[in-house]
Amino acid sequence: MEQNQPGHRSYHNNKMKRFTFCILFGLMCRVAVATPVMVTRIIDGDTFKATVLLADGIEVMSVSVRLRNVDTPELHGDCEYEIMRANQAKQRLSELIPVGSVIEISNVKNDKYPGRIDANVFDENNRDVGLILIKENLGRIYSGGKRQSWCD
């Protein structure tokens, strides 16, 4: 029997992980409580992957997290300047929340893309990562809608 078929143990384990993940994030969306996550990958200047850490030491499947209310340049931007700034923002994000670090997220909401969430992100020193990127001119305030060009 294949591992991804109903009746196989790994199939039921994956279903249970997904169920636990949905319950956890359903609760987090209603409460502004900080939740610890471990950074597993930096995607770009405003998005990373993380594993949610539950109080009893259980790790829940990986999720993509986008910094709430922050826009950074795109790695596949429209001009050389945007691409250069995107790489700088990604590098800075990886310094603020290095892979393997345990940080906190709060005010979790569903993102417009399925499988991704928006959240306020705090580094190991409890600093707001999005605000740091904005103050360092590597990002700007973003409240949805059409993004401004980085290629002026």
Image (cartoon, rainbow, N blue to C red):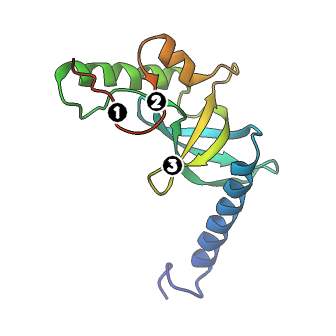
Sequence-wise, the earlier of marks 2 and 3 is 3
Sequence-wise, the earlier of marks 2 and 1 is 2
Residue 137 sits above or below residue 77 on the image: above
Look at mark 1 in the image and give the residue it sits on.
Answer: 147
Mark 3 or mark 1, which is nearer to you?
1
What residue is rendered at 65% in x and 62% in y? 22
Q: Which mark is residue 142?
A: 2
What residue is rendered at 65% in x and 47% in y? 52
Dot 2: few (<14), some (14–19), or many (≥20) neighbours within 10 Å? some
Q: Amino acid at mark 1?
A: Arg
Q: Amino acid at mark 3?
A: Asp
Mark 2 and mark 1 residues within 8 Å of each other at the beta carbon: yes
Question: Residue 78: image x %, image y %?
Answer: 19, 30
The residue positioned farthest toward the left in the image shown: 79
Q: Nearer the viewer, residue 111 or 99?
A: 111
Q: CA distance from mark 3 to mark 1?
A: 15 Å
Dot 1: few (<14), some (14–19), or many (≥20) neighbours within 10 Å? few
Q: Which mark is residue 111?
A: 3
Q: CA distance from mark 2 to mark 3?
A: 13 Å
Q: Quadrant of residue 46?
A: top left
Q: Is residue 63 left or right of residue 108?
A: left
Q: CA distance from mark 2 to mark 1?
A: 8 Å
The residue positioned farthest toward the top in the image shown: 136
Q: How many marks?
A: 3
Sequence-wise, the earlier of marks 3 and 1 is 3
Q: Is residue 139 left or right of residue 87?
A: right
Question: Residue 89: image x %, image y %?
Answer: 40, 22
Question: Residue 2: image x %, image y %?
Answer: 47, 83
The residue positioned farthest toward the front in the image shown: 145
Instruction: Quarter of the image for the C terminus: give it.
Output: top left
Mark 2 or mark 3, which is nearer to you?
2
Question: Residue 138: image x %, image y %?
Answer: 41, 17
